[in-house]
Amino acid sequence: MAHKVSVLRDKNTPSPVFRQLTDELVTLLAYEATREVKTVEVEVETPVATTTGIAFAKPTPLVVPILRAGLGMLEGMTRLVPTAEVGFLGMARNEETLDIITYAERLPQDLTGRQVFVLDPMLATGGTLVEAIKFLFDRGAADVTCICLIAAPEGIAKLEAAHGGNDSVHLVLASLDEKLNEKAYIVPGLGDAGDRLYGVAH
Ligand SMILES: O=P(O)(O)OC[C@H]1O[C@H](OP(=O)(O)OP(=O)(O)O)[C@H](O)[C@@H]1O
Ligand SMILES: O=c1cc[nH]c(=O)[nH]1
Ligand SMILES: [Mg+2]
């Protein structure tokens, strides 16, 4: 995993390779993130006999990539949990004020009892994830697991302060980096994940 993160960080890694590596990394992280997913026993008919298998418990788990950069993680996640449902949140950080603007959402109004898996490669100040988690709990989510590639200690601290007491909030990471710079970018980080994935058109 560490090797993949190193290539991801390299500013000379072009978007197609960056996308491929993001996809591979999230599948590795998703394995860890879904260890606690609620399951139920189901009867399975094999070509030979009837047996007991397992399936996701209802309500179906919900995967929520945070646009733009979270989208780069979606395929890798749905490859591991193909029967999960997918909802979308579009959130952007104002680079001057660091305020978070939620500019799009396509999510069920009622998330009562649902296990939600949030996808976002970067946890910098924590503003985006704190807001996203609040949004999901406000709609009734039972449990939120955030899958990120890289985090700064400042972002972890903000998440702890906002949701630390809630043992239904979980975080899975590929790398905990050193700090934020004066522009609130993660150091050493990988730059702006959305730009690295999709080019600079924002
Ligand atoms: O922890 P924070 O300080 O909130 O920063 C992290 C957020 O910043 C980046 O998104 P950005 O706002 O650049 O939008 P993008 O995903 O469309 O690039 C990244 O994808 C995270 O969502
Ligand atoms: O380093 C950072 C910080 C915020 N958002 C990013 O995409 N990268
Ligand atoms: Mg983003």
Image (cartoon, grey):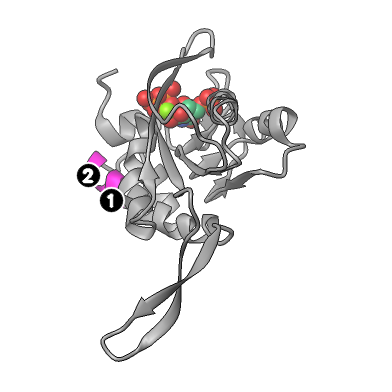
Task: Report crowding for label 2: few under 14, some 14 to 19, many 20 or more residues within 10 A (C-alpha).
Answer: few
Helix, strand or loop under label 1: helix
Who's the residue at 37% across and 45% down the image?
85
Residue located beneath label 2 in the image: 16
Residue type at mark 1: give it: Gln
Is residue 160 or residue 14 the one in the foreground?
A: 160
Question: Does residue 14 appear to the left or right of 38 in the view shown?
Answer: left
Residue type, label 2: Pro
Q: Quadrant of residue 43?
A: bottom left
- Image position, residue 67 (x, y; %): 37, 29
Ligand 3 is found in the corner quadrant, namely top left
Disc 2 to disc 1, C-alpha distance: 6 Å
The residues colored magenta run: 15-20
Q: Which residue lies furthest to the top in this view?
A: 97
Query: Does 17 lie within the magenta span?
Result: yes
Q: Which mark is residue 50?
A: none
Q: Which residue is drawn at 45% across and 37% down?
A: 120
Magenta span: predominant SS is helix
- Identify the residue shown where x is 53% and y is 32%: 186
The reply to whether residue 171 is in sight is: yes
**Ligand 1 under 8 Å from disc 1 Cβ:** no
Mark 1 neighbour density, 10 Å: few (under 14) some (14–19) many (20 or more)? some
In which quadrant of the rendered image does the C terminus lie?
top left
- Foreground of the two, 169 or 121: 169
**Where residue 31 sits: x, y (%)?**
48, 61
The answer to if 186 sits in the magenta stretch is no
Q: Quadrant of residue 103?
A: top left
Q: Which residue lies furthest to the right in this view?
A: 165
Contact between labelled residues 1 and 2, with CB atoms less than 8 Å apart? yes
Can you tell which mark lies on residue 20? 1
Whether residue 147 appears in this view of the structure is no
